[in-house]
Structures are given as structure tokens and as C-alpha cells.
Image (cartoon, rainbow, N blue to C red):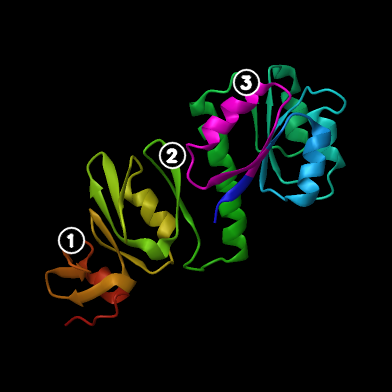
Amino acid sequence: MNWKVLVVDDETLARKLIVSHIAKIEGLQLAGESGNAIHAGNFLRVHPVDLIFLDIQMPEIDGMKFIGTLKNPPAVIFTTAYRDFAPEAFEVDAIDFLLKPVSFERFLKAVNKFFDRKALIGSKLIEGDSTAILYVKADKKIHRIPPEEITYVESMDEYVRIHLLNKVLVTRENISSIEKKLEGGGFVRIHRSFIISKRYVTSISADGVQVQNKQLPFGRAFKMAALAHLGVGTR
């Protein structure tokens, strides 16, 4: 599932820049573009979206007033050339407030806030559900990863490799932060450098665990707890 996004801005170049940024983010899907709030309102009646990148100063109806006309507004990230609007933006519970021209780095930071909010809402709705989605930065994109696709996670000093069923993602996040995100979802830390998914364990020995066709070792400090989580008794 991708989050559907609408871009609303009367400046064509500014709108196209946001559209190009969206194309780089896994998990976001461009639903449409609008050059003014009236067109955006008509669009939203037919095509509901999850997030709007909304310019503030536009002809006829500005972005602030427009968002107030929506009964159940989607999440909004305001874009503008004027810093003075920031306090008003956060009064309407905006995700973020971006100054034009919007750099990709600043755009990514705002999108991360959106993903974090969605993940928080999801965790409250399905607390403890192993299907909760994991969001990871890799290859200058935000990847949306269903945990059931993760076979194991491998720490490689300055980065972490997340082994999926059909590919490997490399991220700068540390393995402890990944472990915390996967907590309660059927994952076990077996070593300082390895977290494994219990669903893909094919065999367990005194030395380690086989995950599909990969043999991974137990770490001395993790072995007893790992075996207990895997349901293997020790003597």
C-alpha cells in the first residue's frame, strides 16, 4: 500500500519540484496535481488522498482557508515562500512547513514526520500486531517494509543490511534501533550482529540458527535468551 499524495500550488515550477521529490520516495504515490484550491477541492471529492503538499498563497482561496473548508482533511504539509505563516500552519496541526524552493533533504525530513505519525497511529490501532509496517531510509529513499518480508537483519559496523525475501536494503540505522522497531513482531536478537525472523528459521543447533539457507551464529551474550524465545529448552 502506498500513501496517496496531492500537490497543490499555483506555481508550476514549484509544483513540479515537489512532484519530482515524491517520485524518489518509496511509499508515496502521486494521486494528482492542482493549480488552485478550487480544483483541489473538486479533485478530493472524487479522489481521497492521505497527504497534501499545499501552497499557502494562491488566488481566490489560500491554502490555510482551504484546509479549513474540508470536513475530514488529510494530513497536510504546507509550502510557501513566506516564513511568517509558520505559526498559523501549526495551529491547524500541519505535519510540517516548508520554505520554497524546497530541497530534497528538507522534503525528506517532512515526509519522515508524516510516516512517523502514520506509524504511531497504526501502532495504537494494532498494538502488538506483527504486521505493523517498518519504515527505513535506504538508497536516499524511504522504504516501506512489511515485517513478514524480512528474513534477518545484519549489522555491518557503520550500516545495517536488511535481508528481505527478494532483495537486500542497506541503511545507516543501527541494529538496536531496528530491533526496537521490530519488537513484538516475531523477531529474535541472536547475536550482537544478527536479528532473525522466527518464521524463516529452518533449523537450530548448539552453534546457531539456519534462516532459509543462511547459517547464523549465536552470540554468547544472546544465546540463552534467544533459545528461550525460539522455544528451545536448555540444560
**Which residue is at 82% across, 27% downward?**
62
Dot 1 or dot 3: first in sequence order is 3
Considering depth in this image, is 185 or 221 the residue closer to the camera?
Answer: 185
Residue occupying the point 53% across, 32% down:
21
Residue on which the image places disc 2: 141
Q: Is residue 194 above or below residue 88?
A: below
Which sits earlier in the primary sequence, circle 2 or circle 1? 2
In the displayed structure, 193 sits above or below 31; it is below
Look at the image and say whether residue 125 sits in the magenta stretch: no
The picture quadrant where one finds residue 58 is top right
Q: CA distance from mark 2 to mark 1?
A: 32 Å
**Residue 207, labelled with which disc?**
none
Given contact means CB atoms under 8 Å apart, are the residues at marks 2 and 1 in contact? no
Of the residues under marks 3 and 2, which one precedes in the sequence?
3
- Residue 65 screen position, x and y as percent: 85, 32
Tell me the quarter of the image containing the C terminus: bottom left
Q: What segment is highlighted magenta in the picture?
A: 5-32
The answer to whether residue 99 is visible is no
Q: Which residue is mark 3?
A: 13
Residue named by callout 1: 219
Query: Nearest the camera: 104 or 45?
Result: 45
Does the magenta-highlighted stretch encompass residue 22? yes
